Amino acid sequence: MKYFSFFVLKVFVILIVLSVILDVTFTEVYLEAINRGKIDYVYNSKERHYDVAVLGSSRANNHFVTQLFEEKGLRSFNYGMSGGHLFEASLLLKLMVERKYAIKNLIIETDLNLSNEHRSDAVAAKFLPYIHHSKTIQKHFSEEEDFCELYYIPFYRYVKFDASIGVREMYNNLRNQPTNTLEKGGFHALGNKKGNMKNDITALKPIRNKYYEEIKRICEVNNIKLIAVMTPMCTDVKGLDYFQKVNAIYPEIHNYENVVQGDQYFSSCGHMNEKGARLFTTRIIKDFFKK
């Protein structure tokens, strides 16, 4: 029994040491990453200057055409993240400010994502390689239920979120293999192939969202003009009064839900194709960036 207990202890110690080594190795690779996604592009950067920066979910990523801003002489980048929530948008803005980004105007897509304060695991996981190197990230995650496991157990976060930051992603970063995420100024155009052209958002209820409140405070403190918008949806949607409910809580959010109409401009009910995105971006430029 004594020898068995010693063997178990030995195996346990080896596993801990191996986990620490793997944790340090993976983290060092991510600390050199710069061209895989928008989070490492910000985290491993120094100060940048933008006339217009965009934050939000896929309804930002697919809807704001960076090229059209640039053509108007507005230095821009679309930091919208597909699948992201306001949890991640707020944290990304905190990192931008920490790295002394000079942002004149911040467009934040805030509509359906106002209905919850949860993180998006697939997107939030991409911040986790830096959690021991960034007080900002550590603090942002500190109220999450699994914070202790993510922070204190070596290599746990890489195993739990293998699809986002595991072996394959680490290897691609090690090879410095770029993705198309940063192309076209961060804007991702959708095609004309139709997805689901019906939607029911009657179950969604907007709330006074603490992460949107954080974004507002950050912009106020750092003299960033905040432009909060709700972006278009297709015509066949149940529960469109959601957008009026948003304005009842936040009157300052501009409702553009119905400014682009016609299924020919949509790839799915909640996402415009490139033609629709160009119409929408042109309207935004006209409304907010007149010279």
Image (tube, rainbow, N blue to C red):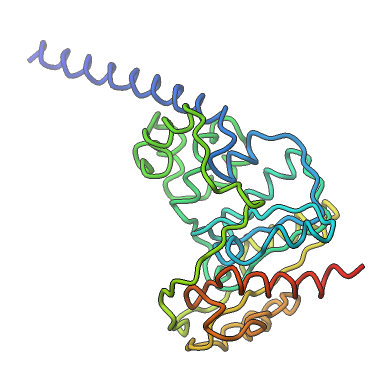
Q: What residue occupies the far top of the structure in this picture? A: 3
Between residue 191 and residue 76, name the one nearer to us.
191
Q: Taking 174 as reference, is 191 above or below it?
A: below
Could you tell me residue 22's position as x and y percent?
Answer: 39, 23
Quadrant of the drawing holding the C terminus: bottom right
Quadrant of the drawing holding the N terminus: top left
Could you tell me residue 112's position as x and y percent?
Answer: 55, 73
Q: Taking 101 as reference, is 19 above or below it?
A: above
Q: Residue at x 66, y 55 (%)?
A: 78
Q: Residue at x 68, y 50 (%)?
A: 93
Q: Quadrant of residue 87?
A: bottom right
Left/right of residue 273 with respect to residue 256 in the rendered view: left
Between residue 34 and residue 99, name the one nearer to us.
34
Q: What residue occupies the far right of the structure in this picture? A: 291
Could you tell me residue 20's position as x and y percent?
Answer: 40, 22
Q: Quadrant of residue 149?
A: top left
Q: Residue at x 43, y 83 (%)?
A: 198
Q: Taking 210 as reference, is 200 above or below it?
A: below
Left/right of residue 102 with respect to residue 66 in the rendered view: right
Q: How many marks?
A: 0
Could you tell me residue 220's position as x and y percent?
Answer: 82, 58
Q: What residue occupies the far left of the structure in this picture? A: 1
Q: Residue at x 52, y 50 (%)?
A: 143
